[in-house]
Image (spheres, rainbow, N blue to C red):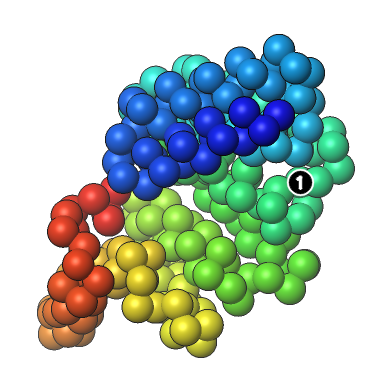
Amino acid sequence: HDGAAVLTSIGTAHESLGNLESALQHFNDAWSVRQVIGADHTQDGADLLAMLGLAECRLGRFEHGLGHAQEGKRLKSELKALATPHGAIVSQQLGTCFRLMGNHESAIAEFEACRRTLLDTGTLHTPQGAFLLKELARSQGLSGNPQEELNLLYEARRILKATGSLRSQSGAALLLDLGSALMDLRRDREAKEVLQLANDMCDELRLQDIGKLVK
């Protein structure tokens, strides 16, 4: 069990650095360990399946990725842990898989279910909630709803500001999405201000590859 946890942590570190192939290898190794020792039908096993599925989808391996993410959600539900903030993360990862596949209707349905869970548990106004709203906003924009996208991004920014979490890599990524959404609506002056703030934040935090933040 500890070995699987270590492998998962290493995979997560690789993922945060953009090394998706290495992340996927470690997630697969962790899953193999869990299956061997009988620790796959667990909360951590469900989390790992969702992470594994999302990594596969990010690499364009949609058939396996979607299957793993859906299995993670099914397992979380079976363990009576889906309607929790932690369970919402698994559903959100499934939603991101749908978005990457271009199935924006299914993505929005997953993200909205996550939002209801966070609302019901009083955890929407947290950095986790802001990240969820950012993902939902992106899907709304891709579905042709630019004003709803903008509203969600403004709400996410308010949450990050209120929690003191805006000056972060996640905050910079949110501002880049917000600037892009403002440009799409031809609100160029506001877009310029937001993108300048994002650029200054990236310089301050020494975030080298800004492009990676919007993917």
Q: Nearer the viewer, residue 112 or 34?
A: 34
Q: Nearer the viewer, residue 145 or 98?
A: 98
Judging from the image, what secondary structure is the residue with disc 1 in? loop
Is 131 drawn above or below residue 81 in the view shown?
Answer: below
Q: Quadrant of residue 157?
A: bottom left
Is 162 drawn above or below residue 32 in the view shown?
Answer: below
Which residue corresponds to mark 1?
82
> Can the viewer see residue 189?
yes
The residue located at (78%, 18%) in the rendering is 38
Is 140 drawn above or below residue 151 in the view shown?
Answer: above
Q: Position of residue 153 (x, y in %)?
A: 40, 71
User: Mark 1 Cα within 10 Å, few/some/many (few <14, many 20+)?
Assistant: many
Type of residue at label 1?
Answer: Leu
The residue located at (36%, 27%) in the rendering is 22
Q: Is residue 62 left or right of residue 114?
A: left
Q: Position of residue 163 (x, y in %)?
A: 52, 82
Q: Quadrant of residue 141?
A: bottom left
